[in-house]
Image (spheres, helix red, strand yellow):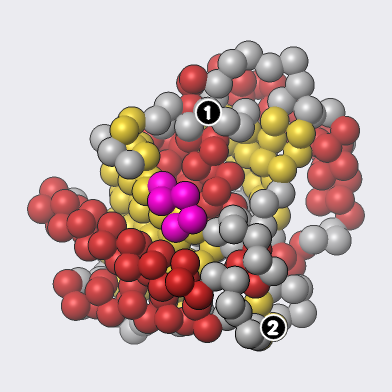
Amino acid sequence: MEPLTLNIAREVAIAAAYEAGRIVKERFGVLDSYDEKDDHGDIVTEADHLAEHLILDKLRNVFPEHSVRSEEFGENDVQSEWLWLVDPLDGTNNYAVGLPLFAISITLVYEKTPVLAVIYEPMTERLYVSIKGEGTTCNGNPVSINRAKPFSKARVGWIQGHAVQNEAKAVKLRHHIDVHTKRMMRLWAPTLQWTMLARGDLDAIIVYHSEGEDLYSGILMVLEAGGTVVDYTGRPFTGVGDSPYLIACQPKHQSYFLNLVQQGLA
C-alpha cells in the first residue's frame, strides 16, 4: 500500500464529502418526492443521486484505475486491489421525512481491508476521518471509544439488513437486547451509530446480517478509536465479507456483549 496514494485519497474523499454534504443540506426539508428502491422499505431521493454523481466524478478524476461500488450506481468495470465504497446519503428515510439524522460515507479498501474512512454529518458539520494505523478524528480532534463510563445497563446500537427485518432469529435477538439493555438505538442511519460508538457515546453496536457501502467506514472508525469488532463467536473482524454478524464495543466489554448476543440467540 502506497502512503502517497492514501494521503491523496484522504484529501479527495474529504473534499467530496464536504461538497456532497452541501448538496444534501441545501435540499433538506424541501423534498417533493422519493422513489421506492425495493420491497423492504428502502428509498432513494434526488439528493442521493446528485451527491453520488459528485462523489464518483471526483474519485474517477483522480483514481480512474480504482474499483468503485456505490449505493445507487452499483459497481464499475475496473478490477483493482483498491476499492471505493460510497454511500452518498446514509439515512435517506430520515432525510425524506425531515429528520436531520443522515451522513455521507466514503471508504477506501485495499486488498479487502478498509484503510481510509470519511464520514460527514452535514447538519452538525462533524467530519470524521480514520486512516488505518493512525486513529480516528472528529474535526481534527482525536476521539476514543474508551472515554465511555462503566455501565450497569448498556446503550446499544442495532444495525440490521433490510431483507431480514422479520426473520424470527433477528426478532428474538432484537427483543432480547431491547429488554436487557438501558437503550437499544436504531437511527435508520448506521454511520451515525458507528461515530457515536467511536467517540464513546454508545457502549456497543450489534450488526445482524447487514452489509452495505456504509458498513466498513464505521468499522474502521471504531477500530481506530480503540474498539474491537468480532463476530458472534468472538472471532476478530478481518476484512470485507458477506452479510456479517458482528459485535463492536470496547475490548474490556467484549465478553459481556458476546454473552448477551449468544443468550439472545439461544
Q: Which residue is mark 2?
A: 36
Task: Say whether residue 111 is visible.
Answer: no
Give neighbour class at mark 1: few <14, some 14-19, many 20+ (Cα, 10 Å).
Answer: many
In terms of image quadrants, where is residue 140? top left
Which stretch is magenta?
122-126
SS at badge 1: loop
Is the C terminus in the top left, top right, bottom left or bottom right quadrant? top right
Residue toward you, 163 or 218: 218
Please state if 163 lies on the left or on the right of 71 as rendered. Answer: right
Residue 90 is covered by the magenta coloring: no
Which SS does the magenta portion mostly show?
A: loop
Relative to residue 211, is residue 246 depicted above or below?
Answer: above
Q: Is residue 4 visible?
A: yes
Q: Tell me the amino acid under the disc marked 1.
A: Gly
**Could you tell me residue 161's position as x and y percent?**
69, 60
Q: Is residue 250 left or right of residue 107?
A: right
